[in-house]
Image (cartoon, rainbow, N blue to C red):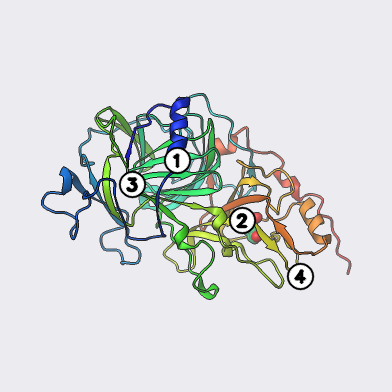
């Protein structure tokens, strides 16, 4: 397939993008060594780097892990492109807008529980890159450790503009408005309720499928997200590998020689260069450092069929391991529709204090620990050891509820759970959409001790 640049952001372009998004083909499977060619014969056979690559293409390797990392972790792809990526002018610094990066030093780490309403609507013409707004994070982008929580709100497609994050991979969760992601590897569609992952260094452009787009991003500076071990669960369950979809090769043809602005996030700052061609010009590729989408509703939820509320680690979709086995740098956890059947059990999330830090967001509906105030597009931060759990209304309701089997199917919440505290940005602490009085949701939990 070839791509029109779909460069415009008018109504007709959006209609065209929606049509394109409907009929996309995919390659299925997590972490597979996929291969794809948009033109038959574009992919060399039997070697990566023949003396002359087929069809006059340039061969180029994109390494997501060091050359020498163990086979099980090694990620790289070979791209066969119209121009080599090296053919570009100098990058120059540009403004970071509302994007911030680790290390997060603007504000003191704050032990308070915090909750935000959705981002305000962006000014007209804001595209995905301009619409990035950082809430906080941890680690150090230059050390390739830690993570950042960003939100985005956009009202325009990226036109003649491409983004590339050298600092980490981007796990994108649309909450409002579908996205068509034009990547170097081809096209992906991400709707609310899906996750999309753009690996470190992969160039892409975001086209809106609706007037407005809003969502969440985990930028992962550390080891790439991978599927969690299943242990005693067995060989199947949670997120099943075959439900992860990579694109098929597709390259930009028309407009290939129109200037394109490439925005590169490097060690926390944005840099731009004006290319004389589109870098989305990959005609064939093979490898396992690839973008992918996953429909969170395909998550095979496990839970108790006897008693007690299991820890939410059984809802882990993807994990970014740290150097300590079992201790994730970041877990991406989803609270998907499921049945609650626990006998003599307080069924919503329990009161707890956690050594891990928890950022939560809501894609749709409601979350079973919060009766009110935790809304789609909003988010909460419960940092290391901060006490939280069901709000007063939820506690009261769940403590006296009739324990019939109950289907929780009116919401889709998620959590980025990280081993390091999440340090909020100044803008997150000063935001007009930061809720005041969040502590009050736990007021009125009366003493009921009857010795
Ligand atoms: O705080 C939260 O709502 C997330 C969460 C959910 C759960 O079911 C158990 C523990 C936990 O931290
Ligand atoms: Fe929690």
Q: Residue 343: which disc?
A: 4
Q: Earlier in the sequence, mark 2 or mark 1?
A: 1
Which type of secondary structure does the marked residue at label 3 adopt? loop
Query: Which of the 4 image quadrants contains residue 434?
Result: top right
Q: Which of marks 4 and 1 is nearer the N terminus?
A: 1
Which type of secondary structure does the marked residue at label 1 adopt? helix
Is label 2 or label 1 in front?
1
Along the horizontal axis of the image, is 62 left or right of 345? left
Q: Which residue was labeled with disc 2?
A: 335
How far, Cα to Cα, is label 4 from label 1? 45 Å
Residue occupying image coordinates x 68% and y 54%:
409
Please indicate, yes or no, whether residue 115 appears anywhere in the rendered image. Answer: yes
Q: Which residue was labeled with disc 1?
A: 21
Vertical position of residue 122 compared to residue 151: above or below = above
Residue that sits furthest to the bottom in the current view? 232
Is label 3 or label 2 in front?
3
Vertical position of residue 449 compared to residue 61: above or below = below
Mark 2 CB lies closer than 8 A to ligand 1? yes
How far, Cα to Cα, is label 3 from label 2? 30 Å
Vertical position of residue 17 compared to residue 388: above or below = above
Q: Residue 232: which disc?
A: none
Could you tell me if the residues under marks 4 and 2 are in contact, i.e. CB atoms within 8 Å? no
Could you tell me if the residues under marks 2 and 1 are in contact, i.e. CB atoms within 8 Å? no
Q: Of 440 and 125, which appears nearest the observer?
A: 125
Q: Earlier in the sequence, mark 1 or mark 3?
A: 1
Please indicate, yes or no, whether residue 382 appears anywhere in the rendered image. Answer: no
């Amino acid at each position: 397939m070839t791509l029109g640049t779909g460069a415009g952001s008018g109504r007709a372009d959006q209609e065209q993008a929606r049509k394109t998004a409907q009929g996309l083909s995919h390659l299925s499977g997590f972490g597979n060594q996929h291969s794809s060619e948009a033109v038959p014969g574009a992919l060399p056979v039997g070697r990566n780097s023949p003396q002359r690559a087929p069809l006059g293409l340039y061969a180029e390797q994109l390494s997501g892990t060091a050359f020498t990392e163990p086979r099980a972790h090694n990620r790289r792809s070979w791209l066969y492109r119209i121009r080599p990526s090296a053919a570009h002018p100098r990058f120059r610094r540009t403004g970071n807008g509302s994007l911030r990066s680790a290390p997060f030093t603007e504000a003191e780490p704050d032990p308070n529980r915090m909750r935000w309403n959705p981002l305000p609507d962006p000014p007209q013409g804001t595209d995905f890159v301009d619409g990035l707004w950082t809430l906080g994070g941890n680690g150090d982008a230059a050390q390739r450790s830690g993570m950042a929580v960003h939100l985005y709100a956009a009202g325009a497609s990226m036109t003649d503009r491409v983004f590339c994050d050298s600092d980490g991979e981007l796990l994108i969760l649309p909450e409002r408005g579908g996205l068509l992601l034009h990547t170097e590897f081809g096209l992906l569609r991400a709707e609310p309720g899906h996750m999309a992952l753009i690996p470190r260094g992969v160039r892409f452009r975001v086209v809106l499928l609706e007037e407005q787009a809003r969502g969440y991003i985990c930028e992962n500076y550390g080891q790439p997200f991978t599927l969690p071990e299943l242990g005693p669960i067995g060989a199947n369950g949670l997120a099943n590998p075959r439900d992860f979809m990579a694109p098929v090769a597709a390259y930009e043809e028309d407009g290939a020689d129109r200037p394109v602005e490439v925005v590169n996030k490097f060690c926390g700052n944005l840099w731009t260069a004006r290319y004389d061609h589109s870098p989305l010009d990959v005609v064939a590729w093979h490898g396992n450092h690839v973008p992918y989408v996953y429909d969170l509703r395909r998550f095979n939820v496990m839970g108790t069929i006897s008693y007690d509320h299991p820890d939410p680690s059984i809802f882990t979709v993807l994990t970014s391991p740290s150097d300590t086995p079992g201790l994730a740098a970041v877990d991406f956890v989803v609270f998907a529709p499921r049945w609650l059947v626990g006998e003599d059990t307080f069924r919503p999330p329990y009161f707890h204090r956690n050594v891990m830090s928890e950022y939560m967001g809501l894609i749709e509906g409601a979350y079973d620990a919060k009766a009110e105030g935790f809304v789609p597009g909003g988010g909460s931060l419960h940092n290391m050891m901060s006490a939280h759990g069901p709000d007063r209304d939820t506690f009261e309701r769940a403590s006296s509820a009739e324990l019939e089997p109950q289907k929780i199917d009116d919401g889709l919440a998620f959590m980025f759970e990280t081993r390091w505290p999440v340090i909020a940005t100044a803008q997150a602490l000063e935001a007009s959409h930061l809720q005041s009085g969040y502590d009050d949701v736990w007021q009125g939990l009366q003493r009921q001790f009857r010795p």
